[in-house]
């Protein structure tokens, strides 16, 4: 095991000097532990120089941690683990050294990680560590700091841009972005990160070419409380490790997995910005937590009986990998040279380290260090704090999501070279049983679950060529990043001019629009009026004098005998309507016909002389309208019918009800009242209180209710 030392390890006392030996590694003091399995000496209080390293624990993929500290000859020596050192203790090359040979996507990835560290380093007053290219080690997709340097002054984002200006060569879009930061157009680190990530999305693509997943109950558990899901195309993956017993853990992990699977599946195709994707991931975790919390409350689960689950999730979008986690399940990125855990467990051990109270070696000895500090279902709504991050992937790599049944005891770190690295050149299908067997052989104390994704970058476009991938839609509230990317793309292609926005014409020039609209409406109305025949008589609804707006019932004619019963319609309606003369040209429908009021027990007496005329003539309802009777050639008709129609018209006009005149050439009337209403279906017997519906050709004549506003 190799550590990077702060102090002079050569001044250590004899016992420590025999165990911790400095190895030649250039100018950096690298120390090798010859007895890594023996307990490490440690003190209770952490020196002040080591506290910033521990407080930046959430960014452990980029910042070393104080593993332990030694004392010799009156001088402390801090040993840093997770430093930019190879497995054989060789330091990584620094940023300025590898910059000229790096691809444009690698450069964007390194700078985006530096920008993510800016705000937390400013908070710990060590932002000057990011202004020294020789202090930043790089390898593949990743950057790491060698040391943390205390700030003598308060550096700004412009100082960071000035540092980036010294890197050579700079592509045209990147130089434009650096210039925007120097000019103050980009004054927030979050905007700078999104601008770099947006440039990466425009510059290259990538996709998951193969997936593999498996789960096993283990050697000691009776039931499997783990659950996983992934997109067949590899766009997203989820692994959950439930807790709360057989009745709780399995349910919790399944509920969370199903909820996240729906939310992650809905992200594709929405054209979201990287910042929006991270926000959606956090919302999805909060939603799953709220569902589990509510279930616990409804079932009155308390204490250890509450069900919950850990979760790790990822979403791949082009050259970007978005990850989120809660609990102690983990995500690893594996390339050909390195295996990096990109999540930090939410347990007491890591919490003590983040508080800068102890070293990593001492925190690992805490008896209850594995107790979770966060889990879905155990956090009240609004208190969950998931960690959501994004990484630019410029090279082929493996993404491993797993529960603690596979990663406990640093099993992944100890075996990645023999089990995972070969899979970059092989099929992933045999990987599932091999990883399960490894975990059963080395651990087996818990359920074992993993999802393995193999990522392949797409063809990258030259950084100084014009962009060919269309920009993603961004909300109008986005301020600087979209503008910076647009400016960078424009400067990269001077020959392509961006047309200016067309000014909005004044309001006075748009007077032709309402005029044309009115003219069109008038033309359509005139055409409809000429093509469709007009009804000669309009049936008006009676005016109601009551406050009830229901339809009034059609009164039953008062006669000496009881009203006849409607016979059952044994003949289809179309057959009944076949006796009616062919309908003339349909009339224009009256769309503004008011609905008649209704009263369940409303009774109105009708004069006996007009009771027999409550039926409209047969031709009056053809085609759903009333044809004009006047102007047609008169035929011979009995005088009795003419006099009766004239009296009926006079009486109804006097009562406020207008009835159409009898059509000339109508069919002979039925001999009895039953014959008049026989063609109507039996449904009319129950629908007398319904509003009258204009009949079509296939419908029989409808009953028209008399005027009920006044009783004669």
Image (spheres, rainbow, N blue to C red):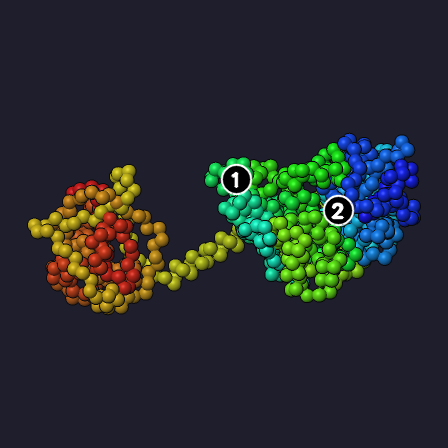
Number of callouts: 2
Percent x, y of residue 680 = 21, 59
- Closer to us: 365 or 48: 365
Front position among marks 2 and 1: 1
Crowding at dot 1, Cα within 10 Å, few <14 / some 14-19 / many 20+, comes out as some
Q: Residue under circle 2?
A: 61
Q: Residue under circle 1?
A: 305
Q: Quadrant of residue 385?
A: top right
User: Which residue is at a point 66% across and 61% down the rendered structure image?
Assistant: 434
Number of the label disc, if any, that sits on residue 441: none
The kind of secondary structure element at disc 1 is: helix
Vertical order, 206 against 65 (above or below)? below
Separation of marks 2 and 1 at Cα, in angstroms: 35 Å
User: Which residue is at a point 69% across and 60% down the rendered structure image?
Assistant: 454
Percent x, y of residue 130 = 82, 42
Crowding at dot 2, Cα within 10 Å, few <14 / some 14-19 / many 20+, comes out as many
């Amino acid at each position: 095991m190799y550590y990077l030392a702060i102090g002079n390890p050569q001044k250590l006392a004899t016992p420590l000097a025999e165990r911790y030996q400095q190895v030649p590694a250039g100018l950096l003091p690298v120390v090798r532990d010859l007895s890594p399995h023996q307990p490490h000496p440690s003190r209770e209080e952490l020196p002040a120089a080591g506290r910033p390293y521990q407080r930046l624990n959430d960014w452990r993929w980029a910042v070393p941690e104080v593993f332990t500290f030694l004392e010799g000859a009156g001088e402390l020596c801090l040993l840093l683990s997770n430093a930019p050192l190879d497995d054989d203790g060789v330091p990584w090359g620094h940023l300025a050294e590898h910059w000229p040979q790096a691809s444009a996507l690698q450069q964007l990835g390194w700078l985006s990680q530096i920008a993510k560290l800016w705000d937390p380093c400013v908070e710990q007053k060590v932002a000057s560590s990011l202004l020294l290219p020789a202090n930043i080690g790089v390898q593949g997709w990743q950057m790491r700091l060698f040391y943390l340097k205390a700030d003598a002054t308060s550096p700004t984002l412009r100082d960071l841009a000035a540092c980036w200006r010294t890197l050579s060569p700079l592509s045209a879009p990147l130089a434009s972005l650096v210039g925007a930061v120097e000019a103050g157009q980009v004054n927030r680190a979050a905007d700078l990160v999104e601008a770099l990530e947006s440039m990466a999305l425009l510059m290259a693509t990538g996709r998951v070419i193969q997936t593999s997943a498996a789960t096993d109950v283990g050697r000691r558990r009776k039931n499997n409380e783990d659950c996983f899901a992934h997109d067949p195309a590899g766009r997203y993956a989820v692994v959950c490790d439930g807790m709360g017993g057989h009745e709780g853990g399995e349910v919790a992990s399944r509920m969370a997995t199903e909820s996240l699977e729906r939310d992650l599946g809905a992200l594709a195709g929405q054209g979201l910005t990287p910042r929006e994707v991270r926000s959606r991931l956090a919302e999805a975790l909060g939603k799953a937590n709220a569902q589990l919390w509510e279930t616990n409350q409804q079932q009155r689960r308390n204490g250890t009986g509450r069900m919950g689950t850990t979760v790790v999730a990822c979403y791949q979008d082009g050259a970007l990998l978005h990850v989120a986690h809660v609990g102690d399940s983990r995500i690893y990125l594996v390339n050909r040279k390195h295996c990096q855990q990109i999540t930090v467990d939410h347990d007491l051990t890591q919490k003590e380290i983040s508080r800068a109270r102890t070293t990593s070696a001492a925190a690992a000895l805490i008896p209850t260090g594995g107790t979770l500090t966060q889990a879905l279902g155990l956090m009240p709504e609004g208190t969950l704090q998931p960690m959501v991050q994004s990484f630019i992937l410029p090279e082929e790599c493996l993404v491993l999501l797993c529960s603690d049944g596979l990663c406990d005891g640093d099993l992944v770190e100890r075996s990645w070279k023999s089990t995972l690295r070969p899979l970059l050149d092989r099929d992933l299908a045999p990987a599932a049983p091999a990883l399960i067997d490894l975990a059963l052989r080395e651990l087996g104390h818990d359920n074992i679950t993993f999802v393995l994704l193999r990522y392949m970058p797409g063809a990258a476009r030259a950084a100084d060529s014009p962009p060919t991938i269309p920009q993603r839609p961004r909300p109008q509230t986005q301020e600087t990043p979209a503008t910076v990317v647009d400016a960078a793309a424009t400067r990269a292609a001077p020959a392509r001019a961006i047309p200016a926005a067309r000014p909005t014409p004044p309001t006075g020039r748009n007077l032709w629009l309402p005029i044309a609209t009115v003219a069109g409406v008038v033309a359509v109305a005139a055409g409809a009026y000429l093509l469709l025949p007009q009804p000669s008589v309009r049936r008006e609804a009676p005016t109601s004098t009551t406050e009830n707006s229901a339809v009034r019932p059609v009164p039953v004619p008062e006669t000496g005998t009881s009203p006849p019963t409607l016979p059952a319609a044994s003949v289809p309606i179309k057959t009944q309507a076949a006796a009616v003369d062919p309908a003339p040209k349909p009339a224009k429908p009256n769309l503004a016909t008011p609905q008649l009021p209704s009263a369940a027990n409303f009774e109105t007496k009708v004069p006996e002389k007009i009771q027999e005329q409550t039926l409209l003539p047969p031709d009056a309802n053809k085609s759903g309208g009333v044809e004009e009777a006047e102007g047609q050639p008169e035929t011979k008709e009995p005088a009795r019918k003419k006099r009766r129609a004239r009296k009926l018209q006079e009486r109804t006009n006097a009562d406020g009800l207008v009835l159409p005149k009898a059509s000339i050439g109508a069919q002979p009337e039925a001999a009895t009242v039953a014959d008049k209403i026989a063609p109507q279906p039996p449904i009319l017997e129950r629908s007398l209180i319904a509003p009258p519906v204009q009949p079509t050709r296939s419908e029989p004549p409808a009953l028209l209710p008399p005027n009920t506003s006044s009783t004669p």
